Image (cartoon, rainbow, N blue to C red):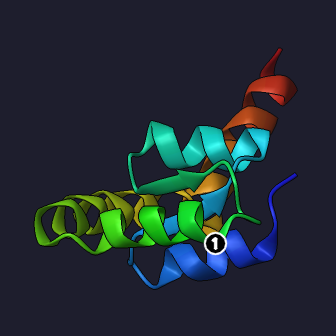
């Protein structure tokens, strides 16, 4: 399952810094919309990930990808897929 905070952060259109949980990690990498911190309890490792995300070119790239992901990973988009799935099941 995905935490609500993931989607709340995604709605901002800003790059994400996430923990290495399976589905959050997968979506973050798939859309290339943020960075994954594998050592969140290590202040130096976390600071390194944050500093990387703040680099102007990296930040701009991640932000552009986050805006694309925001348009796809939302209920309006997913509800259409669900309705299509139900329609397909009912016609079989």
Q: Is residue 89 above or below residue 58?
A: above
Visible residue check, residue 69: yes
Disc 1, SS: helix
- Relative to 75, residue 89 above or below: above
Q: Nearer the viewer, residue 48 or 76?
A: 48
User: What residue do we see at 64% from left, 44% from top?
Assistant: 25
Residue appearing at x 56%, y 60% in the figure: 45
Residue 38 or 84: which is nearer the viewer? 38
Percent coordinates x, y for residue 21 in the rendering: 78, 46
Which residue appears at 69% of the width and 64% of the height? 42
Answer with the quarter of the image where residue 61 lies: bottom left
> At which x and y percent is residue 51?
35, 71
Question: Residue 60 vs residue 37: left or right?
Answer: left
Q: Residue furthest left?
A: 57
The residue sitting at 78% across, 75% down in the picture is 4
The residue that disc 1 covers is 43
**Is residue 83 among the parts visible in the rendering?**
no
Q: Quadrant of the rendered structure where residue 57 is?
A: bottom left
């Amino acid at each position: 399952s995905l935490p609500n905070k993931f989607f709340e952060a995604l709605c901002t259109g800003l790059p994400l810094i996430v923990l290495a949980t399976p589905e959050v990690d997968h979506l973050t990498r798939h859309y290339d919309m943020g960075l994954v911190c594998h050592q969140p309890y290590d202040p130096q490792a976390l600071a390194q990930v944050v500093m990387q995300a703040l680099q102007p070119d990296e930040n701009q790239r991640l932000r552009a990808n986050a805006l694309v992901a925001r348009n796809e990973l939302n209920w309006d988009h997913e509800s259409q897929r669900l309705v299509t799935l139900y329609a397909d099941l009912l016609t079989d």
